[in-house]
Image (spheres, rainbow, N blue to C red):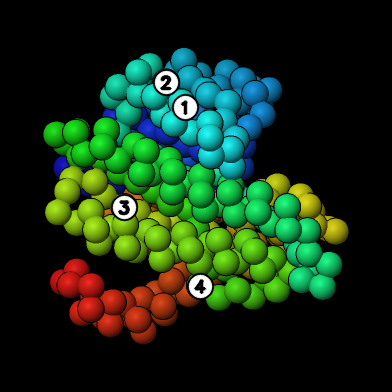
């Protein structure tokens, strides 16, 4: 039997041209899913689409440009009416010192990490609800949304806490529909997420023993994805996610009426 988390035909993957988004896209293709990759840099998307094969379509979109999202949704649904999955993976992490704060850059980070995913999910919701076999929304948060230990990233940590709680409430509000909501909470993974740090390689194994390679990350999450878990961690973040839900999950379920 096909797991519920894989009962879709066509996925939009934001940030699908590189990093975790590309790895997830390649895995979904291996599971016989159609994938539409989305990102800001067309050259990266072109290269990724060509290397993935399977006539993988791509669209250029800055998810932080909220005004561009409605026309993107209209176009992608017209071009690919079978789309029934959204993977909100695109994100940016910027170090900030509140003593010398660049509010414009902070606002941009909030737009990319919060407003973009929200507008995409809500903008696609009616289309997803129309699918007789259901649909899937996957939100990529972070272990830093549970415990904000990376103090140099106060805005990022806050946006990922939002993504965690947004995913919980979205799932609860959609419980009487066929739209499933899954959250993936990565730990430190060796991608280019830290590119704006003083040391952009401090998330690599040679500098951080707890970091996962992209392949290791995928090994963790694909097992839980196939097991139909609603919240998926990887490596060290699995323990944090489990601790959080063991402590606060019963209270949420009682008050929100999810059980």
Residue at image location 17% in from the left, 72% down from the top: 257
The answer for how far apart the CA atoms under marks 4 and 2 are is 36 Å
Mark yes or no: residue 87 visible.
Answer: no
Tag 1 near tag 2, CB within 8 Å = yes
The answer for how far apart the CA atoms under marks 4 and 1 are is 32 Å
Q: Determine crowd level at label 1: few under 14, some 14-19, many 20+ residues with C-alpha closer than 10 A.
A: some
* Element under disc 1: helix
Relative to 37, 211 lies left or right: right
> Residue 65 lies in what quarter of the image?
top right
Q: Which residue is mark 3?
A: 181
Residue at image location 78% in from the left, 58% down from the top: 102
Quadrant in which the N terminus is drawn: top left
Q: Which residue is mark 4?
A: 146
Relative to 25, 61 lies left or right: right
Residue nearer the viewer, 68 or 229: 68
* Element under disc 4: loop
Q: Which mark is residue 75?
A: 2
The answer for how far apart the CA atoms under marks 3 and 4 are is 18 Å
Q: Which residue is mark 1?
A: 72
Q: Earlier in the sequence, mark 3 or mark 4?
A: 4
The answer for how far apart the CA atoms under marks 2 and 3 are is 23 Å
Q: Which mark is residue 94?
A: none
Residue nearer the viewer, 22 or 160: 160
Q: Earlier in the sequence, mark 4 or mark 2?
A: 2
* Element under disc 3: strand
Please tell me whether mark 1 or mark 3 is closer to you in this view. 1
- Residue 4, percent from left and from top: 22, 46
Q: Earlier in the sequence, mark 4 or mark 1?
A: 1
- Residue 81, percent from left and from top: 30, 22
Up/down of 202 relative to 49, above or below:
below
């Amino acid at each position: 039997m096909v797991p519920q988390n894989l009962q879709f035909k066509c996925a939009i993957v934001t940030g699908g041209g590189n990093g975790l988004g590309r790895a997830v896209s390649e895995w979904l293709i291996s599971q016989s899913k159609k994938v539409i990759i989305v990102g800001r840099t067309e050259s990266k998307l072109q290269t990724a689409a060509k290397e993935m094969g399977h006539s993988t379509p791509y669209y250029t979109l800055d998810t932080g440009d909220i005004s561009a999202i409605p026309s993107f949704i209209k176009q992608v649904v017209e071009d690919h009416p079978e789309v029934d999955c959204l993977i909100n993976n695109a994100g940016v992490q910027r170090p900030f010192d509140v003593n010398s704060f660049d509010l414009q850059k902070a606002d941009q980070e909030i737009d990319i990490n919060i407003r973009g995913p929200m507008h995409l999910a809500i903008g696609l919701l009616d289309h997803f609800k129309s699918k007789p076999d259901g649909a899937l929304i996957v939100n990529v948060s972070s272990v830093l949304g549970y415990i904000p230990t990376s103090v140099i990233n106060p805005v990022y940590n806050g946006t990922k806490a939002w993504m965690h709680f947004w995913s919980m409430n979205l799932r609860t509000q959609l419980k009487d529909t066929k739209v499933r909501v899954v959250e993936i909470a990565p730990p430190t993974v060796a991608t280019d997420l830290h590119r704006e740090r003083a040391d952009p390689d401090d998330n690599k194994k040679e500098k951080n023993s707890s970091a996962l390679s992209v392949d290791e990350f995928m090994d963790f999450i694909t097992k839980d994805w196939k097991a139909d878990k609603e919240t998926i961690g990887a490596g060290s973040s699995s323990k944090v996610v489990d601790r959080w839900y063991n402590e606060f999950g019963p209270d949420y379920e009682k008050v929100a009426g999810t059980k």
